[in-house]
Image (cartoon, coloured by chain):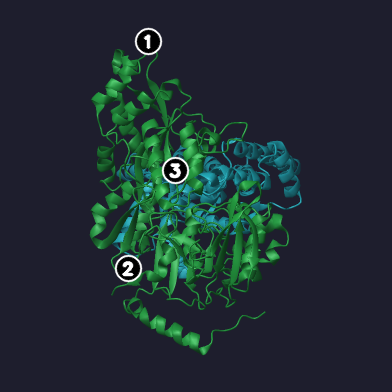
């Protein structure tokens, strides 16, 4: 187990190093740089200004030289300054990360809790009207575009009913807990509705398969109650494939939800990464994308460990 | 040094002026939330100047001079515009036969930063020091290169020495003061100034602002809160607090407006016109919607290196073959005026004495026939060598309005036998590489200009971008006309407005005859305001309406 853990950690470090170069290279290879974009927006920016600013921002240097300079700094714990925000990368990243963790974490927990309940209930009554209704709900949830769902929720709960704020993270100048929760409600609801369908389908399928196993028949033959059969004997093996799906979703906890954040003007990681990439903010984009990569890798690592816990037949040597 | 507190008299005047804005308070509208589609970014006025930043800083900083809603140059921070007639502008002779000019400005006596420190020539000298330093990352370096020196007369009066006598010599719109008493330490290392400026590290420092409002809270990428500047000596702003919220998705912006989360949508950085027109039809009764044509000139650039497009008859045929009036009417409710040239009808240079290219498909067909492009199989014209008359048209992917216009162009040009292949690109690719590197045939986008802006970069033959000049210059069509070059050079230094008018007319005529680009229309901004807000006058130029926030009033 120790050897397995050590090898996986080395793999994670290697993947992160490789990804840092790939991400830096991809951003660098995109046509146009921040100064080119600035020139299109500012009629007074002269050609001499463009040349001077490109030199000042180091944009004239070869990509590899820029990457090595960044890597040297990063290894010393200095992630540099964000060009878009004129602030240290960490000072921008940390609040956005917290916002995303709150938003994504809340919707993740809610969606999984609902999916677990709905998936198990549907699996126990296959082809019943309840199962069909859950299926319909799942397909609707998966099929409805997030931006449309967000817009409908804003129009209903903010514009028509006036119950909830339409955007932002808090009322400027206020920001008490109730105010923050009110601002969180619609984005969390959007993300929960958008993801609960997919999770439910996975739980239902895994649970149906688990309920058809021989050991479940044996448990029932031994007179175990239905609740004990489901929660004690079927759920644990059913969670093995579900754990993989959940592990893959881990990355989204920090990479955010671009569409939902944009629709609700919610300052999270999704929008930050998008803006950083589009604005050619190397330092910020790199740090944010590497963080998302690291979280995905950590999620997969956690899933590997969870398999051993969920299924005693799995062991790592 | 501790800032002086306002004296009793100043407090009395402030209270009286506050009383004058009582209707706003009485109606319960003592705050205003403005929705915009672009986050302002760091607030240093001289670094990375973008529309959203200019909009916010219009509430909090006073430039020396700007063009107002009537497109007149006016003093905001200074007391009087220098002119040769009033003796505050003195032409000078420079080595090499060049002519320069000395301009004397006086800072308003009552101008103070929001921490109470007076605005003085020390700020002027500091701003100049920052601006001319090559490591300081200011965007408007051209202005500082033109200033060869500054002579300080006293704490309020100074003289700028400029190396060129242009007709708009008095306009120092980009010379936006930085507070020396706050920013000096951040400038200790000029190369680090862009990240150490207090506008980035502590944007709520009141000493950074000298306008009617000061920034009190910044949530990067989300919102900015502004409150009244207690040391503002002029008429106070009508609101106790103004919040500018960035909501980039326009559908969400509209929903926020309907929900009352925001009170208004800024025209300068708000809804695209087609969405604004749709909103106006559905909900306009509850709002005051103002449409204001601006200086953004939507057009199609022709790459004149493409053999078929090098023939002026083909370019003119494309103009005759497009019903621009119908297009503007059907897509934008007639709110965007059709352009006959690159000069806005609101500009002093506009004459209107140019070929108009009214929709005339028969004439377009005749021109194409004359140019050797005859009807071929499938309705697409071909030349004697059998080549199809086909072009690739590009614009910014995801720009709904432009994509709609593109489809109209494709459809109408097809009717005159011209095949159009649409190939759009993201803005950063189109503007970052394709257009500056001239890797296009037809490209649809906008030029953003300023009042009486000489189009040297657009049409002078020396401004064609290529590898040798590092792809600088904006003459991406590759247009060359010696007469145009001569007129552009002469126009810049002609001080007589009447002679300039004649030159503008000649330039417009040459442009509209040669058609290095196809003029479409001037973009309009839609201001969606609450019924209770009055006095907001869109400028239609690059100076935002927020500069005149103290003229805004609230009706009960």
Mark 1 vs mark 3: same chain?
yes
**Which shade is chain B?**
green
Residue B157 in view in this figure: yes
Give the distance between the C-alpha atoms of the residues marked 1 and 3, in whole angstroms: 36 Å
Q: Position of residue A65 (x, y in %)?
A: 73, 39
Closest to the observer: B178 or A181? B178
Give the distance between the C-alpha atoms of the residues marked 3 and 2, in whole angstroms: 31 Å
Closest to the observer: B385 or A229? B385
* Mark 2: secondary structure: strand
Disc nearer the start of the sequence (1/3) = 1
* Left or right of residue B386, residue B148 in this image: right
- The numbered disc on residue A250 is none
* Mark 1: secondary structure: loop
Q: Residue B321 occupies which quadrant of the picture?
A: top left
- The numbered disc on residue B533 is 2
Q: Position of residue A205 (x, y in %)?
A: 44, 39
Q: Position of residue B335 (x, y in %)?
A: 28, 48
Mark 2 belongs to which subunit?
A: B
- The numbered disc on residue B384 is 1
Q: Residue B152 occupies which quadrant of the picture?
A: bottom right
Q: Residue at x 42, y 73 (%)?
A: B237
Mark 3 belongs to which subunit?
A: B
Mark 3 sits on what residue? B447
**Which shade is chain A?**
cyan
């Amino acid at each position: 187990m120790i050897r397995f853990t050590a090898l996986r950690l080395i793999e994670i470090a290697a993947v992160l190093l490789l990804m840092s170069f790939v991400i830096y290279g991809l951003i660098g290879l995109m046509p146009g740089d921040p100064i080119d974009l600035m020139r299109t927006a500012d009629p007074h920016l002269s050609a001499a200004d463009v040349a001077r600013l490109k030199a000042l921002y180091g944009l004239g240097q070869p990509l590899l030289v820029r990457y090595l300079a960044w890597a040297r700094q990063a290894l010393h714990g200095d992630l540099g300054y964000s060009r878009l925000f004129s602030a240290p990368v960490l000072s921008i990243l940390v609040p956005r990360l917290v916002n995303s963790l709150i938003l994504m974490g809340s919707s993740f927990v809610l969606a999984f809790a609902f999916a677990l309940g709905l998936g198990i209930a549907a699996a126990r009554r296959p082809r019943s009207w309840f199962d069909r209704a859950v299926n319909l709900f799942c397909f609707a949830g998966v099929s409805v575009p997030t931006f449309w769902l967000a817009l409908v929720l804003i129009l209903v709960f903010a514009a028509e009913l006036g119950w909830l704020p339409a955007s932002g993270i808090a009322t400027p100048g206020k920001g008490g807990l109730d105010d923050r929760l009110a601002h969180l409600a619609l984005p969390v609801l959007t993300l929960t509705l958008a993801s609960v369908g997919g999770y439910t389908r996975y739980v239902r399928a895994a649970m149906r398969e688990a309920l058809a196993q021989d050991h479940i028949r044996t448990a029932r033959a031994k007179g175990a109650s239905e609740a004990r059969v489901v929660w004690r004997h079927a759920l644990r093996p059913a969670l093995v494939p579900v754990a993989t799906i959940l592990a893959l979703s881990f990355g989204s906890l920090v990479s955010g939800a671009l569409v939902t954040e944009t629709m609700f003007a919610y300052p999270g990681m999704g929008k930050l990464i998008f803006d950083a990439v589009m604005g050619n903010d190397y330092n910020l984009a790199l740090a944010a994308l590497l963080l998302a990569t690291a979280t995905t890798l950590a999620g997969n690592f956690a899933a590997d460990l969870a398999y051993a816990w969920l299924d005693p037949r799995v062991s790592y040597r | 040094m501790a800032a002086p507190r306002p004296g009793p008299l100043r407090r009395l005047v402030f209270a009286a002026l506050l009383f004058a804005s009582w209707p706003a308070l009485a109606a319960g509208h003592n705050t205003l939330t403005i929705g915009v589609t672009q986050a302002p970014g760091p607030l240093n006025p001289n670094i990375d100047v973008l529309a959203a930043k200019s909009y916010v800083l219009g509430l909090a900083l006073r430039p020396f001079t700007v063009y107002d809603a009537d497109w007149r140059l006016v003093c905001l921070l200074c007391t009087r515009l220098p002119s040769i007639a009033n003796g505050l502008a003195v032409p000078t002779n420079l080595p090499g036969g060049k002519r320069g000019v000395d301009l004397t400005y006086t800072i308003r006596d009552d101008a103070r930063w929001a921490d109470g420190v007076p605005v003085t020539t020390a700020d002027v000298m500091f701003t100049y020091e920052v601006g001319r330093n090559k490591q300081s990352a200011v965007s408007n370096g051209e202005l500082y290169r033109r200033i060869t020196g500054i002579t300080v007369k006293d704490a309020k009066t100074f003289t700028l020495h400029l190396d060129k006598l242009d007709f708009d010599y008095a306009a120092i719109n980009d010379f936006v003061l930085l507070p020396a008493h706050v920013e000096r330490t951040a400038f200790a290392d000029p190369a680090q100034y862009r990240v150490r400026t207090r506008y980035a590290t502590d944007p709520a420092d009141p000493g950074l602002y000298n306008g009617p409002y000061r920034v009190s809270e910044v949530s990067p990428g989300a919102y900015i809160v502004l409150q009244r500047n207690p040391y503002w000596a002029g008429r106070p702003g009508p609101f106790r607090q103004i919040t500018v919220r960035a909501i980039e998705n326009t559908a969400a912006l509209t929903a926020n407006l309907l929900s009352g989360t925001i009170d208004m949508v800024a025209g300068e950085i708000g809804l695209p016109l087609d969405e604004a027109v749709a909103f106006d039809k559905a909900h306009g009764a509850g709002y005051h919607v103002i449409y204001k044509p601006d200086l953004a000139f939507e057009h199609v650039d022709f790459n004149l290196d493409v053999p078929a497009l090098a023939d002026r008859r083909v370019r003119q045929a494309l103009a005759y073959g497009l019903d621009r009036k119908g297009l503007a009417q059907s897509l934008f409710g007639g709110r965007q005026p059709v352009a006959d040239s690159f000069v806005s009808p609101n500009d002093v240079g506009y004459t209107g004495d140019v070929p108009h290219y009214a929709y005339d498909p028969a004439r377009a067909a005749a021109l194409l026939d004359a140019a050797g492009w005859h009807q071929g199989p499938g309705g697409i014209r071909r030349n004697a060598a059998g080549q199809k008359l086909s072009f690739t048209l590009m614009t910014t992917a995801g720009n709904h309005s432009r994509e709609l216009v593109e489809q109209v162009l494709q459809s109408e040009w097809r009717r005159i036998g011209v095949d159009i292949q649409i190939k759009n690109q993201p803005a950063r690719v189109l503007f970052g590489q394709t257009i500056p590197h001239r890797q296009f045939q037809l490209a649809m986008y906008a030029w953003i200009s300023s009042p009486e802006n000489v189009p040297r970069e657009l049409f002078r033959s020396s401004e064609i971008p290529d590898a040798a000049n590092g792809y600088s210059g904006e003459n991406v069509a590759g247009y060359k006309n010696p007469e145009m070059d001569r007129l552009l050079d002469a126009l810049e230094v002609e001080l007589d407005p009447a002679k300039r008018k004649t030159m503008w007319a000649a330039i417009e005529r040459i442009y509209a005859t040669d058609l290095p680009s196809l003029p479409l229309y001037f973009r309009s901004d839609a201001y969606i305001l609450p019924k209770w807000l009055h006095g907001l006058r869109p400028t239609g130029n690059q100076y935002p309406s927020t500069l005149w926030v103290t003229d805004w009033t609230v009706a009960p």
